[in-house]
Image: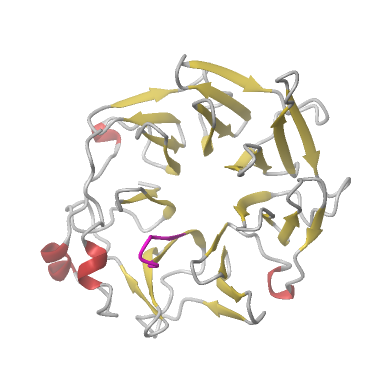
Amino acid sequence: MKHISSFVFLLTLFISSGLNIDLAYAKSIYKIEYLTIDQGLSQNTVNSILRDADGFMWFATGNGLNRYDGYSIVSFWKPDLPSSLVNALTESEGHLLWIGCSSGLTCLDRHTGKFTEIDLSAELGVRPHIAALTTDKEGRIWVGSLEHGLFLISRDHESGELQIRNFNMSNSQLSGNHVASFLEMNDGRMYIGTNHGICIADKAGRQIHQFARAELSNSLVLCMIESIEGDLWVGTFAGLWVIHQSTGKSELYVHNPNDPGSLSHNSVYDIRQDFRGTIYIGSLGGVDIFQPSTNSFTSLPYKDIDNFSLNSMFVRKILIDTDGNVWIGTEK
């Protein structure tokens, strides 16, 4: 597929400067290409981004699912999807794309083009609002919902049938029934971001216990990464936490209107680290890039569409593909 040039040149040219980038300087070092309804997106609010094993880009939006091959966009809505509000995406073996919507979960076989709805309502009586998805190293699908905890989907090795387990505050030690994010650690444990901090599931996916961090206990955990350095980065509505797992110490980064090197906004929706170790933070204030040498942030410029700045300050999702391109999903 066609390669989209986004921020791939930005990193190498300005990352050591430690300064906010003004528009004039931005024009000399990179160019942004935009995908909006004008280019065929079904809706401009992009909630999730995935690049599949064949190189196609998938965008979950507030009104449908979009597949992009670098040239054109194909959109999917109901009845293929349980609802048109698509929040989360993940991929598993067998060319399966899992799609989390506001009214349930469906699975697309990318080879056959067949959509199959996954029934998660057996114990609930309602279709759950799906907020987060991930696939672990064992091929299991972890499903986070808005009000009903999490679902763990695995496949029986003998029958091939799907097995679904629900974990919630009533039947487990899950600290909150709103599950907004997942992070599989290097040791195979799954970190679960809830509306009351982080919980941890064992590698077998049978036991859940709470992550004993008082500073996160009342926070909705929107996103998490384990950095190359082994630190845990956690995005919340109250700022960005960095927990140094080697020492147990933590740092909180928040917005300071008097400090241009501070976090752009306290509501942090996504965090990504590229292969060079650079960390990108997406928030209600745009995109910040962490500068470890100065312990500060560099923010990308914002202006209406001009190919050198963000077209929206509300950044919901960031994806860094294998070519080093940075894809940014916004509300506009």
The residue at the far front in this view is: 158
Q: Is residue 225 above or below residue 44?
A: below
Q: Is residue 270 above or below residue 106?
A: below
Residue 68 vs residue 222, the one in the foreground: 68
Identify the image quadrant of residue 163. top right
Q: Start and end of the magenta stretch?
A: 272-278
Quadrant for the N terminus in the image: top left
Identify the image quadrant of residue 26. bottom left
Across and down, in percent, residue 137 comes to 61, 44
The residue depicted at 73 percent of the width and 57 percent of the height is 200
Q: Is residue 330 above or below residue 58?
A: below
- Say left or right for 211 vs 76: right
- Say left or right for 170 vs 214: right
Residue 146 vs residue 161, the one in the foreground: 161
Across and down, in percent, residue 162 comes to 72, 25
- Say left or right for 144 vs 285: right
Q: Is residue 273 magenta?
A: yes
The residue depicted at 73 percent of the width and 72 percent of the height is 213
Residue 301 vs residue 18, the one in the foreground: 18
